[in-house]
Amino acid sequence: MRLVLLGAPGSGKGTQSERLVALLGIPQLSTGDMLRAAVEAGTPVGREVGEAMAGGHLVPDAVVVRLIASRIDAADAGRGFILDGFPRTVRQAEALNLMLAERNIALDTVVELTVDETLLMGRMKQRVEDALAAGREARPDDKPDSFRLRLATYLEQTAPLSAFYAKMGILKLVDGSASSATVSADIAAYLSTIGGDFNARFSDGAPR
Ligand code: AMP
């Protein structure tokens, strides 16, 4: 199964991706994780994007498109993948469609987690407080000013992907304001209706 998980920062995308990895046995491809690893390792890409990321800005489309292109060709992505945090702009979505078409594959579905803004801001404040209470540094882009910018950037640049994928006929909206267990159950129930590897995995009673 090849799926995109869409949702604003704080919508629970990361948590749901991890659960889908366990459920579907396919990897989560997170451009945010790849970029943070590059920043930490001080690679040329990391040095190029570090400042933009810390400020809550998007990094250039070309950088993330290159990262994803090399990642979907890795052996572990052969049976499918969960895209988390990519695409984030219509240009990235178009590049992704092209990249998949060149490989004779296509997305099965796009699941969008919908959460209203007040709840997102509240969740983010909690994430910063939890990090501080645990004696950890909060993610620099979770701090209120950066987070507000990430949210505004999402609404302006990423929210249009909803219409883009609705037009392709593969968009599914899931209420992301429920508990994470309920959201997981809703996603799993939906995936079981569209078949793919998910049904194959459970139809014979033995997860593969
Ligand atoms: P995330 O962990 O997905 O919230 O991403 C953290 C940060 O990485 C974002 O605020 C951006 O600066 C950068 N980033 C991650 N994915 C993308 C993308 N697809 N396009 C542009 N910037 C991205």
Image (cartoon, rainbow, N blue to C red):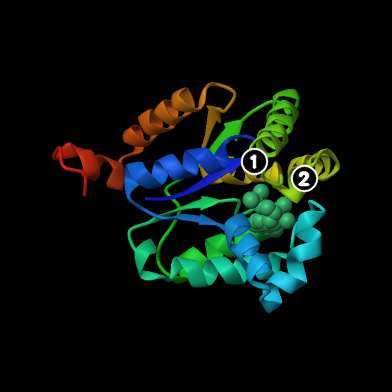
* Rendering quarter of residue 32: bottom right
Callout 1 crowding tier (Cα within 10 Å): few <14, some 14–19, many ≥20: few
Q: Secondary structure at mark 2?
A: helix
Which residue occupies the foreground of this view, 117 or 196?
117
Is 5 on the left or on the right of 63, as rendered?
Answer: left
Q: Which residue, given by chain and number where applicable, does mark 1 sit on?
A: 163
Please determine whether, in this image, residue 100 is positioned above or below residue 184: below
Residue 92 picture location, percent across and down: 64, 60
Report the disc number at residue 150.
2
Can the viewer see residue 89?
A: no
**What residue is drawn where x is 83% and y is 44%?**
149
Does 107 sit above or below residue 19? below
Relative placement, left or right, of 132 versus 166 is: right
- Front one among 141 and 130: 130
Q: Position of residue 113 (x, y in %)?
A: 57, 33
x and y, in percent, of residue 170 in the image: 49, 42
Quarter for ligand 1?
A: bottom right
Please name the amino acid that badge 2 sits on: Arg
Decide which of 174, 37 is in the foreground and name it. Answer: 37
Q: Secondary structure at mark 1?
A: helix
In the rendered structure, the answer to whether residue 122 lies left or right of residue 187 reads right
Would you say the residues marked 2 and 1 are in contact, meaning their CB atoms lie under 8 Å apart?
A: no
Q: Nearer the viewer, residue 49 or 84?
A: 49
At x 36%, y 28%, the residue is 189
Does the closest atom of ligand 1 sit within 8 Å of the Cβ of label 2?
A: yes
Q: Residues within 10 Å of mark 2 (few under 14, many from 20)?
A: many
Q: Residue furthest left?
A: 204
**Residue 62 seen in render:** yes
